[in-house]
Structure formats: C-alpha cells, structure tokens
Image: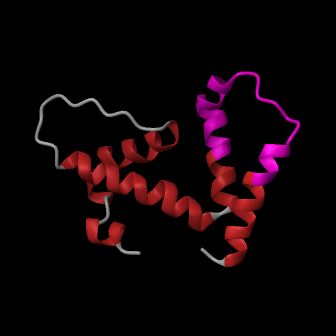
Amino acid sequence: MTFFEKAKLVYGILASFFSKEEIDDVESIKDGDTLNEVMEYFKKMSPKAYDVLVTERDAYMAHMLQDINEENVVVVVGAGHKRGISEYMDHPEKIPLIEEVLTV
C-alpha cells in the first residue's frame, strides 16, 4: 500500500470513532445489499488494502478448503468473505496458485 492509501485507511478508521452516525441494527449490515455497498466502499477507498484483506484471504481460504479430504465440513467465515470464497469454490479453476497468494 502506498503512504497515501495507508493514511486514508487510518483516517477512515479514526473518523468512524468520532462519527455521530449510529447503526441501529448491526445485523442489517450483513444483508446482501448493505454488505455489498460496504465492501464496494472499502474497495474504492483503499484498493490495495481490499486486495490484501479480502481478495487474497478469500483465495487462501478457498485453497485450504480444497485440500480438506472430509465428506462433511463446517466452515465459519466473516460475512465479507462469503461471496468471494463461494465464487472460488464454484469455479476452482479461478483460484490462484498458493505461491501467488503467499507472495508479498
């Protein structure tokens, strides 16, 4: 991430602490449209942070799930990762090589 992207991310986090805007129902954020809006805002605000914190993690988790040789598996992930992991599991050919994901 560039210095500007880091500064913008830190500013956004700090500004959220002092925001007077309140969320009445935290569960409503998990709704499809609201969650998509939040994720798109994050992606727009800091594309590199989004790539590292969401896209690369989705790929890593999907890769690890493919290696599980069990018939029944329960996976618990954050709501922000559900769409990406599901996409990878539906289309495993799109999962990048693990070396690409782990490369810094």
Please state if 78 lies on the left or on the right of 17 as rendered.
Answer: left
For image coordinates 31% across by 34% down, the residue present is 75
Q: Is residue 10 above or below residue 24?
A: below
The magenta region covers 14-38
In the picture, measured across the screen, residue 74 lies left or right of residue 53, that is left
Between 54 and 20, the one lying in front of the other is: 20
Image quadrant in which the C terminus is located: bottom left
Residue 56 position in % (x across, y down): 42, 60
- Left or right: where does residue 79 sit relative to residue 61? right
Query: Is 36 in the magenta?
Result: yes
- Towards the viewer: 49 or 38: 49
Report the predominant secondary structure element of the magenta stretch: helix
Residue displayed at 58% across by 67% down: 48
Q: Position of residue 40 (x, y in %)?
A: 65, 50
Q: Is residue 11 visible?
A: yes
Q: Position of residue 12 (x, y in %)?
A: 76, 55
In which quarter of the view is residue 8 placed?
A: bottom right
Residue at (31, 58) in percent of width and height: 95
In percent of width and height, residue 29 lies at 65, 31
Coloring applied to the structure = secondary structure
**Image quadrant of residue 50?**
bottom right
Residue shown at 64% from the left, 34% from the top: 33
**Magenta region includes residue 43:** no
Quadrant placement of the N terminus? bottom right
